[in-house]
Image (spheres, rainbow, N blue to C red):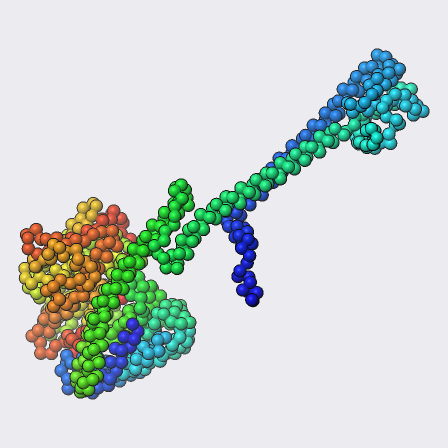
Amino acid sequence: MADRASMRAHVAGPTDEAGGDEQAALPPEDAAGYRHAGDHRGKHGDMKILLIEDDKEAAEYLVKALSESGYVVDHAAEGRDGLFMATSGTYDALIVDRMLPGMDGLSIVAALRAAEIRTPTLILSALGAVDDRVKGLRAGGDDYLVKPYAFSELLARMEALLRRGSAAAPTTTKLRVAELEMDLLARAVRRDGQAIDLLPREFRLLEYLMRHAGQVVTRTMLLESVWDYHFDPQTNVIDVHISRLRQKIDKGFAKPLLHTVRGAGYSLKAGD
Amino acid sequence: MTEAGEASQPPARRLGVTRLWRTNAFRLAALYLTLFATSVLALLAFIYWSTANFVEQQTEATLDAEIAGLAEQYEQRGLSGLVQVIAERSAGERSDAMIYLIIDPQSHPLAGNLSSWPNAEVIRPGWIGFPVEIKHGTHQETHAARATTFAIPGGYRLLVGRDLRDAAVFRHRVSVTLAWAGVLTLGLGLAGGIFISRNMLRRVETVSNTAAHIIHGDLGQRVPLAGSGDEFDQLATNLNAMLDQIERLMAGMRQVTDNIAHDLRTPLSRLRTRLEVSLLERSDAARYEEVVRETIAEADHLLGTFNALLSIAEAEAGSNRTSMDAVDLAEIARSVAELYEPFAEEKGLSLTVAAAHPAIVRGDRHLLAQAVANLLDNAIKYTPEGQVSLSVVGDGHAVRIEVIDSGPGIPADRREAVFDRFVRLEGSRSTPGNGLGLSLVRAVARLHGGTVMLAENSSGHGLRAIFTLPASPPVAHSPLPVEELAKAV
């Protein structure tokens, strides 16, 4: 399974190389996908990530792919080393495999949390049952990704974790992306001063997208966060929800805000 | 041969004894035996002590009676009378084991069957003990004797005693008898203990042997029953039931493995071929990229299938792996319907939901939601036009979810088969799907002690899927940490 994950990461690499600079020349739908990551190069070039993963190949691909995406990545192949590095180094995020030699991933996270080290942590695991996920989060993980995963999924979640600190605080009452405004108290949405009528679920969907504005948000992330479902529906029902929402917030406006990121998910952003 | 090698092959007999000693049953028997033997010995000691005491008292009582008689004679007939009586009584064989002696102030014996005043030790005031020489034909015996002495006015002294040999013989006999009784008791106890523990050991061994066979791969083995219905039989029955369950699960696993072999090999080889061909073609970068994208899509499809299989296996594995809480199926149905509503609308179908009243069941929210989602997914996917309805009806005993569509339906003879893994009907192959949706629905239903069946819509057109779960008795809702955490993701 890990190998398949690595394959994706590898695939992502070369595509990204071409990414950043040429992006403007490509139509938005195409510019997305794996290229999207390149978009942030420089923006978070100083972001440091520690990857604790024992599978050598998987780690190699991940390091490569994350570096291509503009992150500085350190790698630890063993649990105790990983914990040591996570404790001493200054990392912006951790990616921790759940099953490791020496010390398992959950113990590492628990040890870090006990030491008051709150670095955002993404747990990777082959154990995908809801109970396993709950255990991972209880140990102190901030997000949980089941192997095998798409690299775009990992990247999107990584970004969401990294931006969690700078994102709008949960107590914020107003969200804003370009001319799109959301009043969380009045449960009202306006674009260019024009009121947009949303159903409750559409409101929550848009709220999530606005809180993660500028980031890629995958279908799975939406399904987990907005619907609290941890399974993949046989039909891609999220797409239909998004296109409905798009009808309401983008129709009649020159510049679309809600973009489809091919092969990854969606992104709400002011640019093209 | 090394020491370890020798140690691993101890002589058979020693092994037997060691094993017997190691059995719990034998240790228990040994413990009981020790307790039993201790109490038997205490009892025997008490019998011996009281018997010996009795004999002694008997001796003293006899002497007391004799003395009383002699005192009477002395009072009536004076010293000469006493001497005469003693002479009479001590004449002949001392069959009654009585000893008499009367001496004058110069210590000359006047009458009696003792040659001289004994050099005796005082046992207690008034009582003396001394040895007596008895002639038995040719040989002499020394017996212990006990006597009491009296001073008679005028310097005369009287000794009345008894030969203790009979008492000693009696005591000896009692002690020998008691010793034998003790030995016999211990022997029987030990034999019984060994017998019982052997017996138990043998029965445990049959279970152990069966287990060994099973460990070596023969899962068909069962523990034989003795037919007595005792606790060993009960144990064997339960073990056999457990083995049946394991065998069923193994069969299920084997089926899954076979399915995976059959149905994942095809797309995998297709994927491989695609990559191989593109490599042979030596195409340009754009073509490579296209192939890579196609391959990723295909891999995603494979992963989807793989995950679905895992979910089914998880649901089938049993209830202890998932968290069962009181959940409202009506709420789940409404939420799933809300998720699918835009999809139905896009297809031009009308989706109606009738799930107003809470319908509480004990279950796993995620699995139940997935099951309802799969039913609704199928209904919407395979219905080209018309309507799909979802209803939740609960009475006190069961909660029934019905998904009714106006699609082409499923022929009656295929309605059971579609629940099997990877079964897809002809004509549905062009629709996206992996043929695992209904398998998961059935696994989830079974996990919750419920059923799922397909029937013809009452209007005669379309399909009616009925998902029934036992209702949970109303309980106070407690905060569900699992749910909260899941929401926090």
Percent across and percent down for residue B474 are 24, 47
Q: Is residue B252 left or right of residue B204?
A: left
In the rendered view of the protein, which quadrant contains the N terminus of chain A?
A: bottom left
Front residue of this view, candidates B243 and A238? B243
In the rendered view of the protein, which quadrant contains the C terminus of chain A?
A: bottom left
Front residue of this view, candidates A248 and A179? A248
Percent across and percent down for residue B486 are 27, 63
Residue at 16% over, 53% down: B453
Residue at 8% over, 65% down: B347
Q: Is residue A108 left or right of residue B276?
A: right
Residue furthest to the right: B106
Residue furthest to the top: B76
Front residue of this view, candidates B237 and A215? B237
Q: Is residue B397 visible?
A: yes
Percent across and percent down for residue A46 are 31, 83
Residue A259 higher or lower than B19, as above or below: below
Residue at 14% over, 60% down: B376
Residue A156 higher or lower than B57, as above or below: below
Q: Quadrant of residue A255?
A: bottom left
Percent across and percent down for residue A258 are 15, 74
Q: Is residue B140 left or right of residue A140?
A: right
